[in-house]
Image (tube, helix red, strand yellow):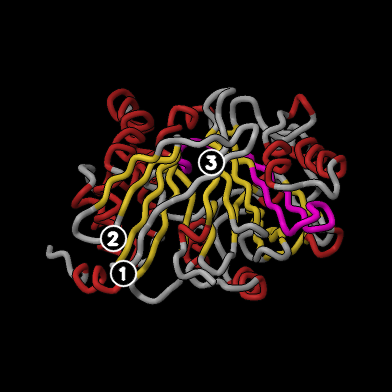
Amino acid sequence: MKNKGFGNLFLRGIYVICILFFCSFATGCVSAKITSSQNEENLASKQKIQLLNVVHLYGTWEEMGRQYGALLKNELQEIYDIVYKPVMQTNKELAGQFLQTACELYDGKSYNIRQFFLGAEQTSGLSLEQLKLVNAVEHNAGVTACSALAVDSRYSGDGLMYGRNYDYNVIFRKLKNDIVLAVFHPGDGSMATATIGYAGEIYCVNGINEQGIFLELNNGTPSGGNSSKNFIHGTESLFDLMFKADSIDFTTRYFNTVSHNSSFLIGVTDGKKAVCYEWDKNTVKISDNTEEDGIMAFSNYYLNPQWSFEIPSDEKSWFGITRRNNLLSLAENSKGKIDAKKMCKIMETPIADGGAMFETETVYQIVYDAQNAELFIKIVDDLTSSWTCIELSTLFMHRK
């Protein structure tokens, strides 16, 4: 199939220089050498900052899929080899279950996203079936925990700070080299959007767009129950939302309109305030908002008293009550002084030390400094892991 549209795209974007800058904290966030590769046909690029892969994709969805497959073929292959290859060789029954889950997820994708996969199939070295499996790696690996904390200037002294811990099956520590910040620049006029997740996951569990809408997902099944197969998965809807949303008002209307398959807590900020949507399969309620007290914290259970659900125990919410209370306590102890460095420190404080980070299940962490338009990302490897700082202006060249 011919590579359509790249010539015009190159002419329109020749002045764009896609360079990522990264900064350092005195403790923890250190500089690292960037190695990059540039696709000669277009503006698509890949850069490596410490353990984090950063890719920029341009054009139609099929074109972006071809770029993605070519730039991340090693990471896609590694996920397949580590997670799926042993199962495919030794346990046909489990392999069949994995494939069924992957196909159900893929069948809920829109036409343009399926075109993305067809493009990736041409360049990644993986078959479409293998790409479907890699896309579903989180869905086949168990359930997430996760936690989040957001504070405004009443706690930070200087704008909104948002932190989140992404907690999953311990096998994901083996995929430390395969986490990707993918920046999609669609040629259809929709907003440029960056997502953070594992290679091959073409949906959204963490994302930020060029209008400064930041979004992250927490598991809510301890309150709302598990999935319904006849619905499009919530992570697909969140991916769609990120290319459209330019305000909290829009995200609220979106969540009030769209049903989905499971139970989540979705944290969203526009850089001025943060809101937690308790998004059940058929309805949504807002449980927390930084506008009220300047602080918002949640883990894996619903807080809004209008629900009929009882608050689950610590044991049935992966110590969710303890993790949330610990985050609130740490924030109170540093009220008025929570800058990006302090927020990073709060998020990386272990549960045993009064924080929310799991010893083995926390696989990566994100802090969003809205005032300074910076993302801090830490891929948890060992005690020497450090934070990578990325300026949003380098992701979205036209962001106002």
Q: Going 82% across and 52% down the picture, which residue do you hit?
A: 155
In terms of sequence position, does the residue under pointer 2 or pointer 1 come before the other? 1
Q: CA distance from mark 2 to mark 3?
A: 23 Å
Please name the residue that numbered disc 1 is placed on: 13
Q: Can I make out residue 308 in this image? A: no
Q: Can I make out residue 185 in this image? A: yes
Position of 338 with respect to 391 (left or right) is: right
Depth check: 120 or 346 in front?
A: 346
Q: Amino acid at mark 2?
A: Leu
Does the segment drawn in magenta span residue 151? yes
Q: Is residue 300 above or below residue 33?
A: below
- Element class at badge 2: loop
Please name the residue that numbered disc 2 is placed on: 43
Q: CA distance from mark 1 to mark 3?
A: 27 Å
Q: Amino acid at mark 1?
A: Gly
Q: CA distance from mark 2 to mark 1?
A: 8 Å
Please name the residue that numbered disc 3 is placed on: 388
Q: Give the percent coordinates (x, y) of residue 241.
A: 52, 67
Q: Amino acid at mark 3?
A: Thr
Locate the C terminus and report the quarter of the image it occupies: bottom right
Q: Give the percent coordinates (x, y) of residue 297.
A: 76, 49
Locate the N terminus and report the quarter of the image it occupies: bottom left
In terms of sequence position, does the residue under pointer 1 or pointer 3 come before the other? 1
